[in-house]
Image (tube, rainbow, N blue to C red):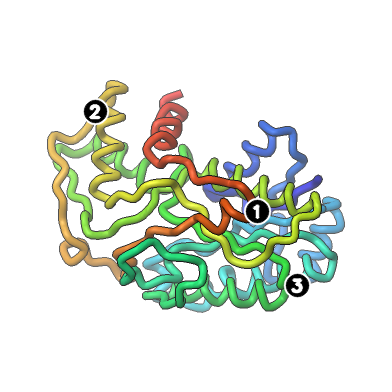
Amino acid sequence: MTVLVFGRSGQVATALVREAEARGVALQALGRGEVDVLDEAALVDAVTRIGATAVVNAAAYTAVDKAETERDAALALNARAPELMAKVCADCGLPFVHLSTDYVFDGSAREPYREDHPLAPLGVYGASKAEGERLVMQQHPQAIVLRTAWVYYEQGQNFVRTMLRLGRERDEVRVVDDQVGNPTYAADIAETSLAIVAQLQAGGRHAGVFHYAGRGAVSWFGFAQAIFAEAARAGRRVPQSVVAITTAEYPTPAKRPANSQLSCGRLEGAFGIAPKPWHERLQVCLERIAD
């Protein structure tokens, strides 16, 4: 098995490289300067040159707020590029796993979102990802769209690293408490993606949209409290107070879903992959950051 990953510097792409190395899986990640993901011929060349037997797309436009004024850029990377990747993989008969997001939902549901819940993105980023999902499945009906949420890792820009930085710099940190979701460790997304690819290469016939996110729900405020509690136990500086605020008190150009919880039962039923408890995985991430 030789896995080609589109994307190189992002959290999940970085995690894929590390997890593949740890498991002895042949994997090659290509970044923006190594392949033009908007050029079909370049994608075919990359697949052929590397001898890929499966492809994972971890490349994305993820600047949620900037997307509101950069719609064309978001659509190019989140919709057009995965459409081309899916077409190339379908033409070559390769398994294709495309990563997507909870932002395809509006967050108004009171229960965790299932895969078949109607899509209703609140902003340009979510709309571009929803369009990418549609185009991927249109081009490659046997593809896997893997939605995830609230991704963090020991590298990159994410909520965990931001809270640790603010804990060093401030005595008080204010965090939104009326948005709820499933914190998801990028290493677990990588492990899940590789496990799906392995099963597909072994003859698995599952296809379509699946959810994978950390087990258990928490608000951003609750997540921040957990981060600071673990940091304090490790001897790190933490703020004297963490204040819960509302979304209205922290306005952003793009609206965020109030409920980002994802139901992951379909993935577990099809592939036998169960989500891991978010708090336990947070501890692992913080230990790796300390190391």
Residue located 85% across and 65% down the image: 92
Gap between marks 3 and 1, in whole Å? 19 Å
Residue 25: image quadrant is: top right
Element at label 2: loop
Gap between marks 2 and 3, in whole Å? 50 Å
Is residue 235 positioned above or below 223 on the image?
A: above
Say the numbered circle drawn on residue 31: 1
Position of residue 113 measured from the top left corner of the image (x, y, whole percent): 42, 65
Q: Mark 1, residues whose alpha carbon is within 10 Å: few (<14), some, or many (≥20)?
A: some
In the image, farthest residue toward the front: 269
Mark 2 or mark 3, which has the lower sequence index?
3
Q: Is residue 70 visible?
A: no
Element at label 3: helix
Residue 91: image quadrant is: bottom right
Say the numbered circle drawn on residue 237: 2
**Circle 1 or circle 2, nearest the eye:** 2
Residue located 45% across and 77% down the image: 118
Contact? badges 2 and 3 (CB < 8 Å): no
Q: Mark 3 points at which residue?
A: 87
Gap between marks 1 and 2, in whole Å? 35 Å
Mark 3 or mark 1, which has the lower sequence index?
1
Position of residue 242 measured from the top left corner of the image (x, y, whole percent): 16, 42
**Circle 2 or circle 3, nearest the eye:** 3
Location of the N terminus by quadrant is: top right
Residue located 73% across and 56% down the image: 55
Q: Which amino acid lies under the numbered mark 1 shown in the image of this protein?
A: Gly
